Image (spheres, helix red, strand yellow):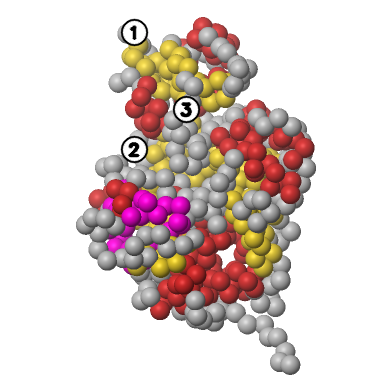
Amino acid sequence: MAKKVISSTYPASDTVFNVANVIAKNATLSGLSNKVAVIEVRGKGKDRKYTYAQLNLRVNRLADALRRAGVRKGDRVFVLLPNRVEILDAMLACLKTGAIYTPANFRLSAEEIRFMIKDIDAKILLYDSGYAAMVSEVISKDIYPLTLVEVGGAKVKGSTSYDAFVKGASTREPGIKSKPGEIAVIIFTAGTTGRPKGVKLSHKCMFFANLANGASVALNRDDVYLGAPPMFHAGGVTCFNMYTLMVNGTIIMLNNWTAQSSLEIIKKYKVTFFFGIATQLKMTIQVPGWEKYVKSLRMVNGGGEPQPAELKQAFMKRGISYVSGYGLSETGATGLNWYAKTMDDPTLSRASECIGKPTTFVEVKVIDAEDREVKAEEAGQIIIRREPTGASGYWNRPEEEPRKFRGDWIYTGDLGKYDEDGFFYVLGRVDDMIISGGENIYPSEVERAIFGYPGVADVAVVKAKHPQWGQTPKAVIQMKPGAKASEAEIIDHVGKVLGAFKKPRKVVFVADMPRAATGKVDKKKIKELYEEK
């Protein structure tokens, strides 16, 4: 019998920054090839588990199938899949073949999806059967011939089932070289013109963004990671999934997140690290008896929106470290990442807006309107150095790049500051700042004060008109089920916590907050509905 050998394509010339090749190494004797790499949650006793060896064979099989279908280096593979093992196959297969993984939000309209497919000139559309009706609508008019691969069947006319597509494909390593600066992933984000724009992430960017995020929370091979962000979101691509696999840990793919289901999964699979946006963490701790499910957790990560101190404390009181995170798609979804282990950590004791310090490799500054770096405690725009985690620019949007990419820096459009100890605070969008009688009011500080009122589930503060002072805060509030509050009570509460001029003069109570596809509060929509100009 032939002896097993240690063999992989990593590291080798021109492949050192390819994340897929790093993960493939773990499928050899250099890693823990028989360890479970992925658990796909399907429910009702149908969960599927894949070892590193099995995952790598799946990836190589799809990579060869893509090549047989004519996909070549630089071609775009458009993906409409929930968090299931096939989306992981697709991403890693694209990276190995030099194709560009281009996922999109499956909650978008057919018209928006059609625009994206045409914008990137996609070679293949890989999608879930659950989206068959939308895909049929997408291809029903003015769309060029497109190879359709359907996971779960072949309901759309002209499509090929995923199983048939990969049948007979080789499981050998593709052996295709990728240069660090070549584009690996395109993540779509909102454009200023109303058209979505694709953020171009290179292999080098992917490598360092994953490394920066993973190292900042000290993930290792013993960790079991559950991430709520979908893998069409930058947070699902560079926030912990890939890094966990890079260090031989285990990830869980959950395609239909609910607070209850995530708690049950955490308990069942002894999850050690959970990442969700702050809204999802809020929902989690509102589940009765949630504490009994989380005994295995050593750390949770909140991101994507303001993270109240009360939320952080709920986990910290149970010995679970809380990671405050901040980043953009353009920065590789990294920037600031800091885990608190004690209640007196600055991210808890100083203010909810305190996010911490920059991750490894990342440099962050705060500048004024004239691009001059400000001093400690002075507010300005947060900018993040482009190298080594930042995007290469926007796909087909050169006119939008100067607003975001300027020289060596990425201009976030977010308002922030740092204190005398170098801890950074995110205060909101630059254009969200409220100027009342010449005084600056940051929506985040008013939101923090209101969130501390009993029964408040979510809050967003926008601008309102004031006959004397020009502008004043206006609070949009969602209460927890069964909880009640009056406008006067909220205003009085804020006046006790902050200066009188920061009190909202108007309060609107809503049954449900508008939310983005990720589940976080949709501040843009709230501004459209409630802001006064």
Q: Nearer the viewer, residue 87 or 201?
A: 87
Residue lying at the far bottom of the rendered structure? 1
Judge depth for marks 3 and 2 and give the one in front: 3
* Count of marks overlaid on the render: 3
Decide: is 472 above or below 34: above
Going from N to C along the chain, the mark reached first, 2 or 1, is 2
Q: Which circle's residue, 3 or 1, is located before the other in the chain?
A: 1
Task: State the SS at label 1.
Answer: loop
Taking the image as shown, residue 314 lies to the left or right of residue 116, namely right
What's the mark number on residue 513? 3
Residue 16 visible, this angle: no
Q: Is residue 127 magenta?
A: yes
Q: Quadrant of the N terminus?
A: bottom right
Residue 468: mark: 1
Closer mark to the observer between disc 3 and disc 1: 3
**Label 2 environment density (alpha carbons within 10 Å; few <14, some 14–19, many ≥20):** few
Q: Amino acid at mark 3?
A: Met
What is the magenta range? 112-136
Seen at 42% across and 45% down, the residue is: 107
Secondary structure of the residue carrying numbered label 3: loop
Pointer 2 with pointer 1, Cβ within 8 A: no
- Provide residue 496's location: percent of width, then percent of height: 58, 11
Residue under the point 59% across and 22% down: 480
Amino acid type, label 1: Gln
Relative depth, front residue between 125 and 21? 125
Identity, as a three-letter code, of the amino acid under mark 2: Glu
Question: Camera-side residue: 258 or 496?
Answer: 258
Q: In this figure, which residue is indicated by the disc labeled 2?
A: 370
Front residue of 44 and 6: 44
Could you tell me residue 115's position as x and y percent?
A: 28, 52
Asked whether disc 3 touches disc 1, contact meaning CB atoms under 8 Å apart, the reply is no
